Image (cartoon, rainbow, N blue to C red):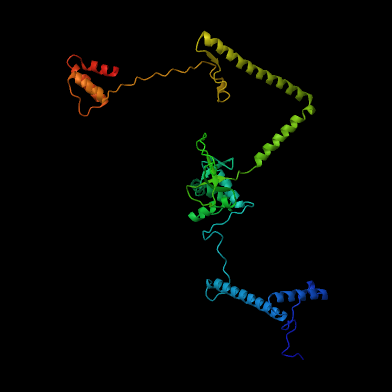
Amino acid sequence: MQNPNSPPPGAIPPGAIPIPMGPGGQMPTPQQIAAMQQQLAAEAQKHGMTVPQFVEHIKAQRMAQLQQAQRMQQQQQQQGGQGGPQGGPQGPRPGPPPGAQGQPQPIRPGPPNPVAIALANFLRGQQLKPRTCIINGERKDMFRVKRALRALESPAYAKARAKNPALPEIKDRASLENTFKLLPMSMLALRVSKSDPHEGHDHAPKKGKRIKGLWTVKIEQQQDAGDDMYYVWLYEGSQIMRKVYGALALVLIFTVVLYPLWPLVLRQGVYYLSWGFLMLLGLFFLMAIFRVILFCITYFVVPPGLWLYPNLWEDVSFMDSFRPVWAWHETAKPKKKKKASKSVNAESAAQLAGQTGHPPPATATTTATTTQVQTAPQQRSYVAPRVEELADDE
C-alpha cells in the first residue's frame, strides 16, 4: 500500500537534482550524470547558492513562466470571444487581412502574383500615354497613375474580368487603389519621382544638352496611388517573341557558318549576289565623287554652284536622300542692317527750340519733341507729306 505523503511516481523529490533523460527514454551513463552534477554545482556556486537551493530556484522560474503564458493565452481567448454572438461558442476571431488598416506593407522580392501579371498585361495593352524615362542608366516606360485608374474603371476592364475572373472586382475607390497596388507588391511597376542626375556630386551642376520630356527618375519608398504620381514599368510583358527572334538569329548565323556545306546552286547564287552588291556600292561611291567634282566646276562657271542629290548626306529617310535630283548651292544671305531711328535728347531739343524761337514743351520726349520742333516752323512752306518724309529720313 502506497504512503499518501509519498510523492507521485515520476515526480522529483524536493532537493533532488533533476536528471534529463536521453533519446528514446534511455538513462544517461554514470559519466554523463557526474558531468551534469559538476556543471550544476558550478552554476550554483556562481549564484551563491547550494545545489538544492539552485534547483528550487530554477523550478520556481519555470513555474512562473508557465503561469504567465497560461494567463496570456486566457486573455487572448477572452478578447477573441467578446465580438462573437451572445450564447455562442467563444473563440479567436480571424484577424483583418494585411493592409486593411492602411498600414504600410514591405515589398518582398519574389515570384510575382499571377493576378498581378494578368493586371499588368491588361494595363500594358491600354492607352496610358507612356513617357520614356531614365532609371539606373536604363530607358523605361513611365505612366501616370490617374490614367491607369481610368483604365481599370473602363468597360474594357469589365470585359477582361469576364474572361479572367481572377482579376479583382472594383467597387469603390479603396478597392480601385488596392487593385492597382498589386503592381508594386509584385515588383511589376514602382512609383518614381524626378531627380537630378548630378545630385550628391561635389562638382557644380553641369549645363548639358537636355532632351525635352526625358526625365531622370528615382524610386520612392512610399508606393502610394495618387492621381498625379508616376510609375515606371519594370514588367516587359511576354518574352516569347524575343526568344523566337534570338533563336532565328542563331539559326541564321549557324547557316552562314556552314556556307562550305551548301549546295552548289546556293553558293553560286550567293556569289553573284555578292558581286552585284559590290557593284552597287562602287557606283554609290563614284556618284559621291562625281557630285563633288560637278559642284567644283559649276561653282566657278555658274555660281553659286550645283549639287547632284543635295540631300544625300542629310539625316533623312532613304528615299528622301535622292530627292530632289539636283539643286543650287544655298549661300548665306547677308542680313540687311535696319536703319535705327535717331532719337533727339533733351539738350538737342533745347538747342533747336532756341534756333527756331519756340520754347520746348514741358513734357517733351525724344520723338515728340522732334516732331513738334520740325513741323512748327515748316507748316507755312511745306505740306504734311513732305514733313513725314523728313522725319523718316532722320
Coordinates of residue 328 in the picture (x, y in percent): 50, 15
Q: Would you say 18 lies left or right of 165 here? A: right
In the image, what residue occupies the spot 56% across and 46% down?
122
Residue furthest to the right: 30
The quarter of the picture where residue 87 lies is bottom right
Quarter of the image with the C terminus in it: top left
User: In the rendered picture of this protein, how many numbered marks are placed on residues?
Assistant: 0
Does the rendering let one see residue 384? Answer: yes
Q: Residue at x 51, y 9 (%)?
A: 302
The answer to whether any part of residue 172 appears in the image is: no
Which residue is outermost to the top? Answer: 301
Against 7, residue 303 (above or below) is: above
The image position of residue 165, as x and y in percent, is: 58, 53
Decide if residue 293 is on the left or right side of residue 56: left
Residue 39 image offset from top left, x and y in percent: 75, 73
Q: Is residue 226 above or below residue 318?
A: below
Q: Is residue 114 above or below residue 76?
A: above
377 sits to left or right of 36: left
- Camera-nearest residue between 107 and 279: 107
Say which quadrant the N terminus sits in: bottom right
Out of 138 and 258, give the one closest to the viewer.
138
- Residue 68: percent from left, percent from top: 61, 75
